[in-house]
Image (cartoon, grey):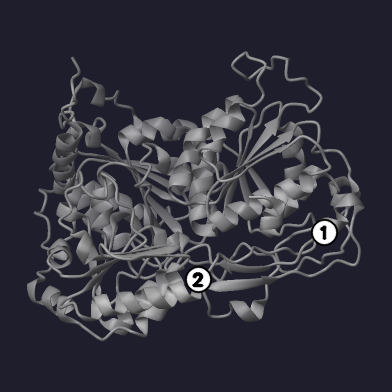
Amino acid sequence: MNDEQLGWGCWGSLRWDADEAIGGDEVNFRHRKPLEFCLKHANRSRAMVVDYHRPVCNNLASSPNGVVSTIQTSVSPMSLVIPSQSTLGGHLARRLVQVGITDVFSVPDDFNFTLLDHLRAEPRLNVIGCCNELNAGYAADGYARWRGVGACVVTFTVGGLSLLNAIAGAYSENLPVICIVGGPNKNYRTNRILDHTIGLPDFNQEFRCFQTVTCFQAVVNNLEDAHELIDTAISTALKESKPVYISISCNLPAIPCPPFSREPVPFSLSPRSRNQLGLEAAVEAAAEFLNKAVKPVLVGGPKLRVAKACNAFVELSDACGYPFAVMPSAKGLVPEDHLHFIGTYWGALSTAFCAEIVESTDAYLFAGPIFNDLSCVGYSLLLKRESAIIVQPDRVVIGNGPSFGCVLMKDFLKALSKRLKRNTTAYDNYQRIYVPAGQPLKCEPKALLRVNILFQHIQKMLSGETAVIADTGDSWFNCQKLKLPRGCGCEFQMQYGSIGWSVGATLGYAQAVPNKRVIACIGDGSFQMSAQDVSTMLRCGQRSIIFLINNGGYTIEAEIHDGPYNVIRNWNYTGFVDAIHNGEGKCWTAKVRCEKELIEAIEDSTGPKKACLCFIEVIVHKDDTSKELLELGSRLSFANSRQPKPQCSWA
């Protein structure tokens, strides 16, 4: 995408019209021309109109003021910057603040020292040092899930390649993470070999790696185009809702430069292409398709978030009376206390009575789905293409028939709600067959604690002032069964499924929304991969509650294919956290083996220790898993072990 397509000038900064923001999902940005321009960039300033949105989809996980918490409105476009901050590093810091980032997760090293100095000099920006680059990336991922955008800063190659896995996860989850790398001195010739590289005179290896997991890459090697490259990168991350890569030569951040001596003039993002005729045709075809159905249903997918269409999805159900479910990775995006909500649709792993309603219907509308081997339970869903309307963020496909491009999901759902006849047949059927879930069998007072008892007590802890983070593993399935109160957040990484993601994500999410208390459910195998940054949580004064579920290994892997490689060394987890605490900061740990001890630990963590980071190690039997994990394990094992199809043999 070139500069002309972006309409991007070197003097951009985010500004919004508050009148447009009140009570709506989106904010319109307007360009305000400066009184003067700097240097040769003056002729590059172009006006644009922008659609901008809340970083999250509904009131379950929105910023306190109901709009984008990331936009600063008090910047005067011609105000002078103090000389010490009229640098590339100072400009980048102001840019991050202007899009709502107040915390940057970093790991220092020789190529980014100067850049970090200038980021720290910005009083509105908090630079948080992490224990490793992978966790810094996970933290930026968690931060972006609430704030709508996150950022991390690492060093060239050795830091960037360590970060790569976390950025790939953010890409898969459609999260705008700004990945900033301190690059080599611009004066170095490319025939030189540098430290922290693989020992070849190739400065582009890291760049090539990031090309596949970011939507834009900017390599800033001179001041002449630094302004434009940084603006383009940040704007592209926000527009595409994907990570971007910015590499800045280590000898540039501290150089004073006239273009950075004034606060930037506002810029805005051009709206996505809309095809009005296509929208009308798609709505007409979908309304005809659904109005002749006997018992249609709605199913929400994870791309509701990136399409900013969660409210429109719920409003559609209100208008037509159809029941709605969510795919597992969309949990938390819609209110679960809604009258028409029927649970999580996950094929054979669905919450009770949900799959029966969805798979027995004659028409279903999927909004923002991702169909992969995990969400399809080894591709075993009992769905018919000819009965489905698939709505993606910018495309609608109806059955085996027509496909409509340049149709935005939110526009489509809002228009469709006005054309559908009210039909509550599927919801009435759900009401007839639904039986409330029973209670798990009681434990003996000193019997080994069961996982289902643990989550029964976690359910009681949830409120609008909490959020749940579930790591890859059995916590996925147990957290799917939690009933979220209105306002309670819930986050998974189900597309990428990186074991260990939750420690960094808990750090980032808790930093993004300090008024919520994060409840993290983490397996022992996951924790061993990223445990160090519990220390960063303590440095930041966070008060999350971490339930460390100790069952002696990689249980989710064992249920797919067991072997000795799924058994891990048992740690003294509370002792580990106590050692990290080292008497500095507020930390409290407990080890529980039975329900009585669990109740006491929860009472302490929510009572006298509520201002502390609370770490509760829960010891359970190695075979104590949810029935859903057993089902998934057998189905994925079967899918993965299918024999290759016969190939033609040639004489």
Give above or below for 82 relative to 460: above
Report the side of 527 relative to 451 (left or right).
right
Q: Amino acid at mark 1?
A: Glu
Quadrant location of residue 489?
A: bottom left
Give above or below for 534 relative to 67: above
Report the side of 151 relative to 549 (left or right).
right
Asked if one can make out residue 403 in the rendered structure from this viewpoint, the answer is yes
Crowd rating for badge 2 (residues with CA inside 10 Å; few <14, some 14–19, many 20+): some
Residue that appears at 8% across and 76% down: 432
Q: Which residue is mark 1?
A: 263
Badge 2 marks a residue whose secondary structure is loop
Estimate the x, y position of residue 529 in percent, counting from the top left: 40, 31
Give above or below for 297 relative to 201: below
Q: Which residue is mark 2?
A: 275
Q: From this viewpoint, which residue is outermost toward the front?
A: 651
Residue 59's label in the rendered image is none
Q: Amino acid at mark 2?
A: Asn
- Cβ–Cβ below 8 Å for labels 1 and 2? no
Residue that appears at 69% across and 17% down: 194
Residue that appears at 30% across and 79% down: 287
Estimate the x, y position of residue 545 in percent, counting from the top left: 40, 50
Q: Nearer the viewer, residue 156 or 122?
A: 156
Q: Marks 1 and 2: which is nearer the front?
A: 2
Q: Quadrant of the C terminus?
A: top left
Report the side of 162 relative to 111 (left or right).
left
Asked if one can make out residue 65 in the rendered structure from this viewpoint, the answer is no
